[in-house]
Image (spheres, helix red, strand yellow):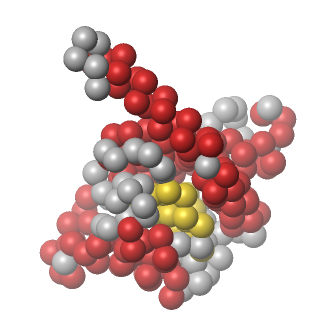
């Protein structure tokens, strides 16, 4: 990183991360598969579920509210929920341990035909891994939005989107939010073409 202009250098690093993502056909195919899975889930009457820790929880929440609220224009609300309620999380953590906070929510809310979006910059988060395992056991499609090679979570995902090049969580999360927004846009274009 440039010592003379570290701010510009950070933007250049972010640009290089996006360029690496765009140059990787597997990444683009993953986003297409994510959009297809979300579209199929919604048109079949299923729900979109999401989870992650820290900044990834913020992204999971952002993902859910784009469906229940408004994205590009007014349209019907769509069923999406992020596992982020503090009372639920602390109750489950107290009773079952922090590693079970998301798996227990999958057990409570997930049904066959739903889709779980599991966010992790490392693919190593024990509580997100447990959610993926629970989802797989219940016939819930799992989309992993990951980084740093995908970790053990990659193998638990029906669709794994792994950000290449970046080695830090901030750069990975910058791509994650783009992936989420672009998948939402792709689905909304199909369901509500008048908004475009």
Quarter occupied by residue 114 = bottom right
Residue 70 lies left or right of residue 98; in this view the side is right
Q: Is residue 64 visible?
A: yes
Q: Residue at x 62, y 37 (%)?
A: 71
Residue 118 lies left or right of residue 3; in this view the side is right
User: Does 66 appear above or below 83?
Assistant: above
Q: Position of residue 51 (x, y in %)?
A: 41, 61
Count the marks. Answer: 0
In the image shown, does 173 or 152 lie closer to the viewer?
Answer: 152
Q: Position of residue 105 (x, y in %)?
A: 39, 73
Quarter of the rendering occupied by the C terminus = top right
In the image shown, does 194 or 5 lie closer to the viewer?
Answer: 5
Q: Residue furthest left?
A: 94
Q: Residue at x 25, y 11 (%)?
A: 4
Residue 103 lies left or right of residue 92; in this view the side is right
Quarter of the rendering occupied by the N terminus = top left
In the image shown, does 96 or 170 lie closer to the viewer?
Answer: 170
Quarter occupied by residue 97 = bottom left
Q: Residue at x 30, y 57 (%)?
A: 53
Q: Residue furthest top?
A: 4
Q: Position of residue 194 (x, y in %)?
A: 84, 35
In the image shown, does 133 or 85 lie closer to the viewer?
Answer: 133
């Amino acid at each position: 990183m440039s010592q003379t202009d570290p701010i510009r250098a950070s933007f250049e690093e972010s640009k290089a991360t996006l360029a690496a993502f765009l140059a990787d056909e597997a990444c683009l195919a993953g986003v297409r598969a994510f959009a297809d899975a979300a579209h199929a889930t919604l048109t079949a009457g299923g729900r979109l579920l999401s989870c992650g820790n820290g900044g990834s929880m913020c992204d999971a929440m952002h993902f859910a509210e784009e469906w229940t609220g408004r994205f590009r224009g007014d349209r019907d609300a769509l069923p999406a929920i992020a596992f982020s309620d503090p009372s639920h999380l602390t109750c489950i953590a107290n009773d079952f341990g922090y590693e079970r906070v998301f798996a227990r929510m999958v057990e409570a809310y997930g049904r066959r035909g739903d889709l779980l979006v599991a966010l992790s910059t490392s693919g190593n988060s024990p509580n997100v891994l447990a959610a993926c395992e629970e989802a797989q056991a219940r016939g819930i499609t799992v989309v992993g939005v990951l980084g740093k090679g995908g970790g053990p979570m990659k193998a638990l995902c029906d669709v794994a989107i792994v950000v290449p090049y970046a080695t830090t969580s901030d750069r990975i999360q910058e791509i994650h939010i783009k992936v989420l927004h672009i998948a939402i846009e792709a689905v909304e274009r199909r369901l509500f073409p008048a908004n475009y």
